[in-house]
Amino acid sequence: MNLSETYEIIKSHLLEYCDEDDYMIFHEKESTIFHLDIYWIKPNDKINFNILLTSGISSMPLETPDKNFSKYIELCILLPPDWISDDNWTQPEKNWPLTLLPKIGRYPFQNNTWLGFGHTLETNGKLPGTNFEGVIFLNSVSLDNEFLNIKYKDNNIKILIIFPLYIEELNFARNNDSLKLIELIDKANINDIIDINRKNVCKI
């Protein structure tokens, strides 16, 4: 599996859901380990939010513990429709998702590990303009399963949603269980589109 194959597969996959006019690509200028681009899929007549989707992580397989977990992943962040425009990506409080995606995408290869549903990571400080200090990897409730699973030979490229967490939520997931945190998030009717002012489900 190489980058040219996965790049074209992901591009073809996206064109099933949107027109070329609905997205643009942030091309990585300098790469380590593998080349990683990010698709920005803008709100259209099918979705009312922004999608940032990596293209490149799946060029290398992860060392997963068993076949129940996909060896090939890409990462996605969902942002509200008013989050971004063509000219405000340079603002730190707006462009942190663009810097976070490559950093997390390379994390498992730099640390001899893997990423899957329910895993959590710290962000080494608050994300700019927010009180979030960690992330959890989720299956999306805003995107359908067909979008989240990209066929490749006898494997799927699994798209995982990055969902930012407050430090109390991150600690709760680590001290208890990620599934228990996800249950609290679901109970609070919080979806996977980022809301920097959302309720902290673990703060009394």
Image (spheres, rainbow, N blue to C red):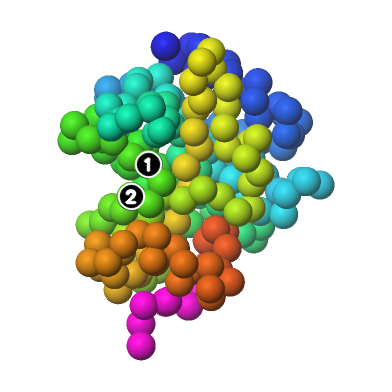
Q: Indicate whether 47 appears above or below 189.
A: above
The question of residue 80 being in magenta is answered with: no
The location of residue 68, given as percent across then percent down, is 41, 33
Labels in figure, total: 2
Left or right: 70 in relation to 122: right
Residue that lies at the very extreme toward the bottom in this rendered image: 204
Quarter in which the C terminus is drawn: bottom left
Q: Which residue is mark 2?
A: 119
Q: Which residues are magenta?
A: 197-204
Q: Indicate whether 124 appears above or below 51.
A: below
Return the mark for residue 116: 1
Left or right: 83 in relation to 95: right
**Can residue 130 be seen at all in this image of the molecule?**
yes
**Of the residues shown, which amino acid type is indicated by label 1?**
Gly
In the foreground, 158 or 42:
158
**Of the residues shown, which amino acid type is indicated by label 2?**
His
Q: Residue at x 32, y 30 (%)?
A: 66
